[in-house]
Image (tube, helix red, strand yellow):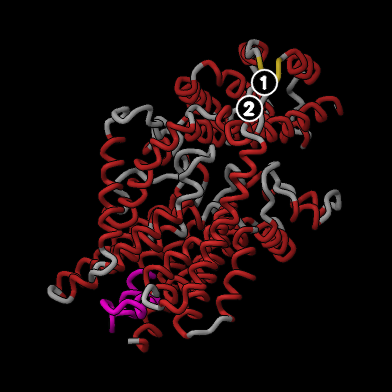
Amino acid sequence: MIRLAWWVLPALLALTTLVYLPGIPGPSLLDDQNNLGLLAEVQAGRLGGAEYVLSSGDGGIARPIARLSFLVNWWLAGDDLRAFKAVNLALHLIGGLLVFTFVRQLARADRHLAGRDTTLALLVTATWLLAPLLVSTVLYTVQRMAQLSALLTLAGLCAYTAGRSRGRDWPIAVAFVLCWPLATLSKENGVLLPLLALLVEIWFFAGAARHQRFRRLLLGLTAIPAALVLARIAWDPAWLMAGYQERDFTLGERLLTQPRVLLDYLGNLVLAPGASPLGLLRDDVAPSTGLLEPAGTAAALLAWAALLALALASRSTPLAGAGFGVLFFVASHLLEAGVFPLELYFEHRNYLPAVGALFAAGVCVILLARRYRALAAGIALGLVLVMALLTAQRAWLWRSDLSLYQHAVHTHPRSARAWLGLAGVLLQSGRFESGRTALDRAQALLGPDARLAIALQELAAACVLDRPPPEITWQRVAGAGRIGADLHTVNALAWLGGAITSGECDVLDRQRLATILARLDVAPARGRAGRLRDSHLDTLRRALSAH
């Protein structure tokens, strides 16, 4: 069967490349500017390369490995965004090879999958490479951070599993001395490598009693980051809760919501790809405020309780691999589905967890093939083809910001961020009336608290269109009361500050704007959004005073 892989794997990589190619010319979005925008400062000599790599770009935790890759990308190809996206695609293909290696190692360690390791590895690799849920990870440039963290974690798992299978210690040392820190320095999710390796150890090497030292090692390594977080919270209890001041949900509501979100992820990966509307912008997810608000909250909790119970019970059965996949999926989500005040839903969080979900599905198909070979082959082929078609459709949408935002407001009409994004694109292209309508839709969804963000976007649009803003816009800015730290205000400040800094804003009365901003209260805010707000506000004020 390994000879078959030499033919099928290159074909899968080629198919994945063809499917993704339409999205390579796509736009820069959201956090791209905060992370890539400083590269122009490096090129101009106003910022050192080391300073860029070691900073976070948004005031958060540095991710130097990912940022170093952006810097090298810039040195080699300049500001051509296609080159950045092409590297992301290349990393995705490398990820496919790592998935193949890891799944084949696991299957060879499972006696119930004997002789089916290559077939299973090819199936899981195909579905992972072509999973439509992962498109926004590959084509959203800044998510190279998630890619690198996941790929280095996979490399570490491959090294650990190889070392355990062959009785050699040096691959295990490579996993934790090299891969673990590199994965964590790409994005914080890499810290989960010891936990995932512990899961592999317990599930596939439990019979090796003489190797208890490996389990003790992994428990110790898993406990280190957990202890550091607990110590940080004990030292400053407000540290964790400060981020929730910027959210419209509480810690309890986030924890209640995540089972629904994880179930949605899982369904889109293995049951019916695209069953719920896919999309980069998912600020329309309503937080769970109780077990029955919304009604699906309790159902999701019961579903996960049942899934986890079945996964744990499967360990000594032919479905052990499927149980492992479910546990791997959940464990990989622990950081971003836990207590930290992150947004409720983002597709890119599934880049590594998808391996577990698709491994579980693949095991079920392989076991089904023992009795119903034709049916299992049909399911596998149908799943791969459906995924390829849906991924091609999504990649095509990523060809331009207009097509992306138009699709976003169509599939997620209650996403204020989607309407604001569409408004920005329309306004910058000179379609003022359509852009104004989109801003009105965003205002209706966001309520009065978004008055300043909407008004600032109108001022920025006036700059781009070289068209004096109406008096009502000035009144909205002046009547805002305070400058919040919500994401919409932060983005509007960044857009307007960029327009004025570039000298494209002759139509604005800069003195009037500076006076109004000086009169507005700046809402106190901690955390990433507060730091970004203050940074963009300082930039805007300096630009206004310079003129």
Magenta segment boundaries in residue numbering? 104-125
Does the segment drawn in magenta span residue 147? Answer: no
**In the image, what residue type sits under mark 1?**
Ala
The residue where tag 1 is placed is 523
Q: The N terminus appears in which quarter of the rendering?
A: bottom left
Number of numbered discs visible in the structure rendering: 2
Residue 184's x, y, as percent? 61, 58
For the point 70% across and 41% down, the residue is 59
Residue 172 placed where, x, y %? 55, 76
Q: Distance between the residues labelled 1 and 2?
A: 7 Å
Judge whether 492 appears above or below 392 on screen: above
> In terms of secondary structure, what is the magenta stretch mainly?
helix
Residue found 69% across the figure and 28% down from its top: 463
Question: Is residue 408 shown above or below 207?
Answer: above
| Among the two numbered marks 1 and 2 on one chain, the one whose residue lies closer to the N terminus | 2
Does the segment drawn in magenta span residue 108?
A: yes
Residues at badges 1 and 2 in contact (C-beta under 8 Å)? yes
Q: Can residue 404 be seen in this view?
A: no
Q: Residue furthest left?
A: 371
SS under mark 2: loop
Image quarter of the C terminus: top right
Q: Report the residue marked by disc 2.
A: 485
Q: Which residue is drawn at 62% across and 38% down?
A: 234
